[in-house]
Image (tube, rainbow, N blue to C red):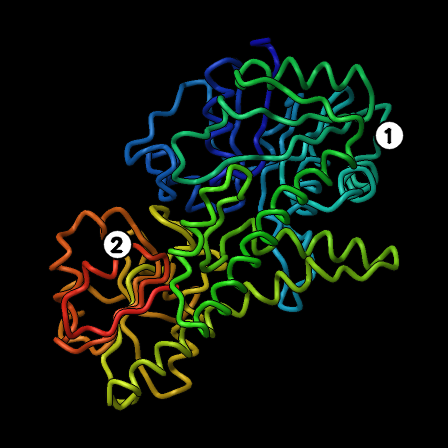
Amino acid sequence: MAEERIAVMGVGYVGLPLALALAGVFGDVRGFDVDSARVKALREGRDWNDETGQSLRTPVNLRFTDRVEDLAGVGVFIITVPTPIDDSRRPDLGPIEQACRAIARVIARGALVIVESTVYPGVVEEFCGPIIARESGLSQGRDFKLGYSPERINPADNDHRLDNVVKIIAAEDGETLERMAQLYGAVVHAGLHRAPSIQIAEAAKVTENIQRDVNIALVNELARIFDRLGLRTHDVLEAAGTKWNFMKFRPGLVGGHCIGVDPYYLIARAEAFGYYPEVIRASRRLNNGMAGFIAERAIKLLTRAGRSIKAARIGILGLTFKEDVTDIRNSQVPEIARELAQFGAAPLIHDPHADPHRVKEEYGIELATWEQLGELDALVLAVAHRVFLARPRGDIFGLLRPDGVMIDIKSVFRPDEVPAGLHYWSL
């Protein structure tokens, strides 16, 4: 197997761990990225996504490049680029198209192109294949083969990694499927699931994330109902969770590159075939509205406490899309800040995991230091990073004035931990 030459197209959160794993088995692995700064950092042993540790040890047989010409002679191309949505929440296949065009410039007969990016059913065979064939002059299915193996990387999750999670593989024919099995079987020890077709594998991936989005939307709606009833959602779910078949989901903000994005891919495909999804759309609408709901609750609590919203000092802890990651893509925290700003507030956001330059570029937000957060009228614990939870409780509550408002989105604190005088609310 060491003779297989592999190129991973896109070395971000998904591509880098994959490239490193493959380089441990195969003799020639190349990591390609259009971001020259990213490539330079990786060559210097720095991974700003922090998914492999602060010091990156790159095997000598793994080369990072931003030059398409350096991919000549590769036999297996694995596409791991992002699949975002546009401003209209429609699938944006631009990054995949760019990767396919790059591959077409250097692909040779006998090559295998595998897509790992999340897509709707039909993208690999009806979109990727034709682009590569047209641009290269080669014949899809004869001169080069196609496969699909959806990524299941979960950032900051050390329990579920590439090697110990079952991997779905699918290909356009049996021979190609076995080639994929040899490739992935060398680095995935949990086993492989051979899907009957590429489109089934594509559908399986979006289904995984849609199921989670829908279930979170359900508990988010329950949280809104229980809030009106004066009930703490955490206590309700804890009691309900004692039943053996109760599915344990928690309310909160839904962001990131997967759950808040992937449903729109299947929505678009369904609508192209004349079906208008109702539950999936309703779930997206509910989850997208949670930032506004939380901001509204903060405003009401401040008003009840007799505070002027425009003069109030509001702090927010956490900006990344989830705990203990550096990824700020599609974070809902900036939306909370925007909602508060509509009432005249100017919240201070602190997140030690988020890169200040990226946050400024992406959201126009200047991150605050911990020291800038004192004497707050309200504090929103938006992302429960371990670095926050490791602090003494007094450090957190000490950021607030004695009669301040504490918004605990993830119900990290027990009500009996909260100092007397503070106005506490949890989702």
- The image's mark for residue 139 is 1
Please, what secondary structure does the residue beneath circle 1 have?
Answer: loop
Residue found at x 60% / y 8%: 1
Residue found at x 35% / y 40%: 50
Q: Mark 2 points at which residue?
A: 352
Gap in angstroms between the C-alphas marked 2 and 1: 50 Å
- The image's mark for residue 286 is none
Residue 33, percent from left and from top: 52, 40
Q: In which quarter of the image is residue 2?
A: top right
Above or below: residue 48 compared with residue 360? above
Please, what secondary structure does the residue beneath circle 2 have?
Answer: loop
Q: Nearer the viewer, residue 62 or 217?
A: 217
Amino acid at pointer 1: Ser
Above or below: residue 349 compared with residue 104? below
Question: Which of label 2 and label 1 is nearer to you?
Answer: 2
Q: Quadrant of residue 277?
A: bottom right
Q: Quadrant of residue 121?
A: top right
Residue 385, percent from left and from top: 29, 50
Residue found at x 73% / y 36%: 104
Amino acid at pointer 2: Pro
Above or below: residue 239 compared with residue 112? below
- Disc on the earlier residue, 2 or 1: 1
Q: Categorize mark 2 by other alpha carbons within 10 Å: few (<14), some (14-19), many (20+).
A: some
Residue 363, percent from left and from top: 42, 68
In the displayed structure, does residue 337 sit left or right of residue 8? left
